[in-house]
Image (cartoon, grey):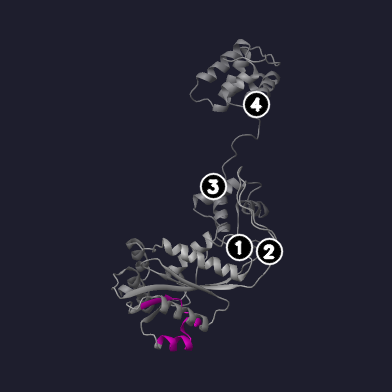
Amino acid sequence: MARGRKSSLRIVLAPEARQTLERWQRSATMAAGLARRGKMILLLAAGSSQSAVAQAVGVQRTVVRQWAKRFLAQRVDGLADAPGRGAKGVFPPEVAIHVVRLARGRPDMLSRSLSQWDCHELARQLVTEGIVQEISAATVRRMLAAHQLKPWRHHLWLHPKHPRDAAFSATVAELIDLYTRHLRADEMVLSLDEKTSWQPRPRPSPTLPARPHHLPNRVEHEDTRAGALNLLAAFDTRSGKVYGHGYERKRQREFIAFLDAVDVEVDEHIRTIHLVCDNVSTHHGKEVRQWLAHHPRFIVHFTPVHCSWMNHVEQWFSILQRKRLRIVDFESKDQLHTKLDQFIREWNQHAHPFNWSTKSVAKIMAAAPALAA
């Protein structure tokens, strides 16, 4: 064993004490803590330094010195845990039942000004109600884990204001058919929507690029307002190509102007253009209906209420947000418009669709049991 400076705490073992400590090392039922402390004392008595003992046992040098002092003061009895240390007693089942009851209720019901429980607040509530004298947050967490409860988490859900009936299932089936079936050579499916109120937010200082030594991009915190821009975009569900244009307002007039642009850009041999969009008034107002009546190759399919996730262009908007608009530092609306157009052109150079797998389609249809009725 490596040796360092001799310990200033000189330990001499009586035969009885040495026999006891050596028996601890051989015992298979001895508590690991006691066996480890006994080994420290044996090594110190053999002349090893405190540093060498700490390395051999796998503890800090201060721990070795602490137990050496305890042994010199109280001999073998000093190596045992002091009263009150070690594992605490097990709480009766009634405590866990009360924890679960609290966790399954809102704090407001108990006149607590909390939005939701956490383990520290539950432990404090148990003490306040006199259920226990003291309890740790870790113990509360274990009780909750045994019942698979996490009251500190939350997720959003939607009240079924609009019925999920046969009509809803038929609409879902129609959209899935548009996304998955083989299209004729003269038809296409465009997923269309708008992303509203994108602000340029010019900064007083330019954004600085990343540098070595873990220095990230640096964006000036202060910004100014310079209006807002609305992006109308249509996503080809088979090729992934995007048609897009920015407008300062969001009305039927702008929607029709965008449809005119799409009508001009899409080749004439495409005789049927299926438009998938949500059912906001901008998409089915009187002016839009009149335009559609004069352009019969456009057929509109509306997603069900609160089902914008079925619109493929929403996924493309997410990509746009992450790759182009995570840092917003444009000088003006014109520059923002220019950069959006450039992003669309670059995307179309390597465009790809978002293919729905058969597994995801089956999952959606399983959630619409009225279809099978």
Q: Which amino acid type is marked by label 4?
A: Val
The residue segment tinted magenta is: 273-292
Q: Identify the residue position indicated by label 3 in the image.
A: 142
User: At x 43% / y 77%, what residue is drawn?
Assistant: 262
Residue in front for this viewpoint, 46 or 265: 265
Categorize mark 1 by other alpha carbons within 10 Å: few (<14), some (14-19), many (20+): some
Mark in front: 3 vs 4: 4
Question: Along the polypeptide, which appears first: circle 1 or circle 2?
Answer: 2
Q: Nearer the viewer, mark 1 or mark 4?
A: 1
| Label of residue 63 in the image | 4
Tell me the element at label 4: helix
Whether residues under marks 2 and 4 lie with C-beta atoms below 8 angstroms apart, the answer is no
Choose mark 2 or mark 3, whichever is in front.
2
Question: How crowded is the residue under tag 4: few (<14 C-alpha within 10 Å), some, or many (20+)?
Answer: few
Looking at the image, is mark 1 or mark 4 earlier in the sequence?
A: 4
Query: According to the image, label 2 marks what residue?
Result: 223
- Asked if residue 274 is among those painted magenta in the image, a careful observer would answer yes
Q: Which structural element holds mark 2?
A: loop
Position of residue 176 measured from the top left corner of the image (x, y, whole percent): 35, 70
* Crowd band around label 3 with a 10 angstrom C-alpha radius: few (<14), some (14–19), many (20+): some
Q: Identify the element where label 3 is drawn.
A: helix
Say which element carries label 1. Answer: loop
Is residue 309 among what the camera can see? Answer: no
Whether pointer 1 and pointer 2 mark residues with C-beta atoms closer than 8 Å, the reply is yes
Alpha carbon separation for disc pair 1 and 4:
54 Å
Pointers 2 and 3 in contact (CB under 8 A)? no
Q: Which residue corresponds to mark 1?
A: 328
Earlier-in-chain disc, 2 versus 4? 4
Query: How far is mark 1 from mark 3, CA to CA?
Result: 44 Å
Please state which amino acid type lies under the numbered disc 3.
Arg
Judge whether 149 appears above or below 201 on screen: above
